[in-house]
Image: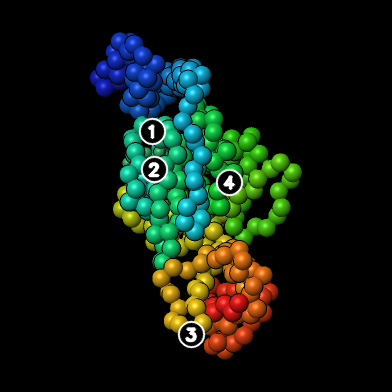
Amino acid sequence: MPANLTPQYLEAERRFRGAKSTEEKLAALEAMMAVIPKHKGTEHLRGDLKRRYAKLKEESEQARRRRGGFSVAVDREGAGQVVLVGPPNAGKSALVAALTKCATEVGDYPFTTRKPIAGMMPFADIQIQLVDLPAVSDVYMEPWVPSLVRPADLCLLVADLASGTVLEDLERVLTILERGKLTLASPTDVVTPAVGWARKRAILVANKLDAPEAGDALEVLGSVYEGRYPVCAVSSQTGQGLETLRRAIYDGLGVVRVYCKPPGENPSLKSPVVLPRGSTVVEMAESIHKDFAHRLKYARIWGSGKFDGQRVQRGYVVQEGDILELHI
Ligand SMILES: Nc1nc2c(ncn2[C@@H]2O[C@H](COP(=O)(O)OP(=O)(O)OP(=O)(O)O)[C@@H](O)[C@H]2O)c(=O)[nH]1
Ligand SMILES: [Mg+2]
């Protein structure tokens, strides 16, 4: 079958041949991969491009490591840290941009994102940190990606409803994460992981709901993954489903918001204390100041289905929206 290469492809190929630096070569290869017609006749060529890309990329990484690269840890901020993982081009960066208004690079070619980019997503009266990561892929993956998934509180597994290969894409992502001893599970799943393994809470975010083929892809996706993860169908482009996703992210973190009030004063309802679900009064006190924990005598509580102002003991489990007056 003839390859029928387009003028854009031939132009990118010409740039590749003229490229001097590895960066120029990689950029030209990326352009070739983006514009190459995707049909049977170009299958071999596409495989070949991917291999060349992976090899060059690995070489340039080795060179970078020898020079000493940038630090890839992301400082935790806000009420929780949420990382986005998924195949190339799924719209991870576009989602972070839509949810946080943070400027992260969105590109119509794979492997756009090279570094973690963190942005804060407002939800009600708190801020949640979203971390945009580079793609998880066998073609090329930044070697430190799994190490940034490990410390996160929640994972957004981003699927591309327009890719035409949504199930295979996700299978591959999950397999690659497993090689790094990471499994993703529903936030409601409480199984403890085996030694050395990390089990991350995850939400499956089906992106590009606006695409014409999205409806069918979503159905297929749901038939396999519903029950395994909560599924949120969204379009980062039209904004559809994003409000539901914000709420699902908050719920997935497994936290509660409680408010502190000094005795005799009105509560400050502006900035809640965010605690893991199941936390007690004493743990709340400790999170405000470590000395409070042993100085705490009792607390009075508003909310919680208790009588307003009722006295509760140190071990009382606080509920979402509770207002506490700490007596020390
Ligand atoms: N139709 C449609 N296109 C989208 C949507 N979200 C993202 N895209 C497009 O998908 C392409 C990839 O978006 P990115 O946000 O760069 O994808 P990514 O997952 O960050 O990609 P990498 O960083 O390369 O792994 C871009 O051309 C976006 O414009 C969406 O909701 N609908
Ligand atoms: Mg990206």
x, y percent for residue 58:
50, 20
Query: Residue lying farthest right?
Result: 195
Say which quadrant the C terminus sits in.
bottom right
Q: Are marks 2 and 3 in contact (CB under 8 Å)?
A: no
The disc label shown at residue 264, or none = 3
Q: What residue appears at the point 43 percent right and 63 percent down from the top-left corner?
A: 126
| Secondary structure state at the residue bearing disc 4 | loop
x, y percent for residue 85:
50, 42
Q: What residue appears at the point 64 percent right and 48 percent down from the top-left corner?
A: 199
x, y percent for residue 63:
48, 17
Q: Are marks 2 and 1 in contact (CB under 8 Å)?
A: yes
Say which quadrant the N terminus sits in.
top left
Q: Earlier in the sequence, mark 3 or mark 4?
A: 4
What kind of residue is marked 4? Answer: Pro
Calculate the distance from the C-alpha at mark 4 to the C-alpha at mark 2: 20 Å
Calculate the distance from the C-alpha at mark 2 to the C-alpha at mark 1: 9 Å
Crowdedness near tag 1: few (<14), some (14–19) or many (≥20) residues, C-alpha within 10 Å: some
Calculate the distance from the C-alpha at mark 4 to the C-alpha at mark 1: 23 Å
In this picture, residue 24 sits left or right of residue 249: left
What kind of residue is marked 1? Answer: Thr
Q: With respect to residue 74, does 201 lie above or below? A: below
x, y percent for residue 198:
65, 45
Q: What residue appears at the point 29 percent right and 13 percent down from the top-left corner?
A: 14
- What residue does disc 4 label? 151
Does the image show residue 10? Answer: no
Q: Is the CB of the residue bearing disc 1 within 8 angstroms of ligand 1?
A: yes
Quarter of the view holding residue 233: bottom left
- What residue does disc 1 label? 112
**In front here: 202 or 50?**
202
Q: Earlier in the sequence, mark 2 or mark 1?
A: 2
